[in-house]
Image (cartoon, grey):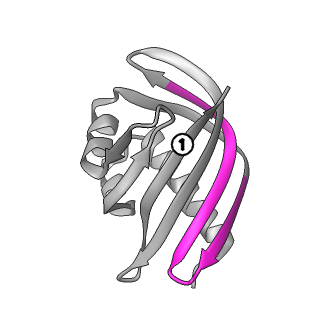
Amino acid sequence: MISEDELIGLSKEKFKTWETNDLENLEKIFDDQGLLICSNGKAETKPEVVEIVKSKRKELKNLSLQKAFARVYGNTGVVHGEGEITISIGGKIRSSGLNFLDIWMEKDGNWKLVSSHLNQVI
């Protein structure tokens, strides 16, 4: 069984993977049927997320996680967090507050990100 601290670590790893353009790890942690819901409401599939990170159309420059808590429900874990994010979209740098919700599921002994929802705090 995974601990709540380990779940938070997985969500931190997700952001670090995006920040460093680590496509191999992104492929590993993101479930094949997973979805990323962006702050604009657009749902992106795993292939779309991989392409965005690969193309650097949306580059994570920095995430300062200020608060996070997690809950484990059997083979499912939920991480809620908030912080400050700096991102480059089309070469324009934006910084804002961020709230996120990550849902992780254990599949074949590995924890996979099955859903991630990002909300910009204005």
Residue at position x 56%, y 20% from top?
94
Relative vertical location of residue 119 with respect to residue 12 in this rendering, above or below: above
Which range of residues does the magenta coloring cover? Answer: 68-87
Residue 8 percent location from the top left of the image: 63, 62
- Left of 20 or right of it: where is 52? left
- Left of 70 or right of it: where is 58? left
Q: Judge whether residue 92 is colored magenta.
A: no
Amino acid at dot 1: Leu
Q: Which image quarter: residue 25?
A: bottom left
Q: Quadrant of the N terminus?
A: bottom right
Q: Which image quarter: residue 107?
A: bottom left
Q: Element under label 1?
A: strand
Residue 39 percent location from the top left of the image: 51, 35
Residue at numbered disc 1: 118
Residue 16 percent location from the top left of the image: 51, 47
Residue at position x 37%, y 43% from top?
43
Relative vertical location of residue 21 with respect to residue 30 in this rendering, above or below: above
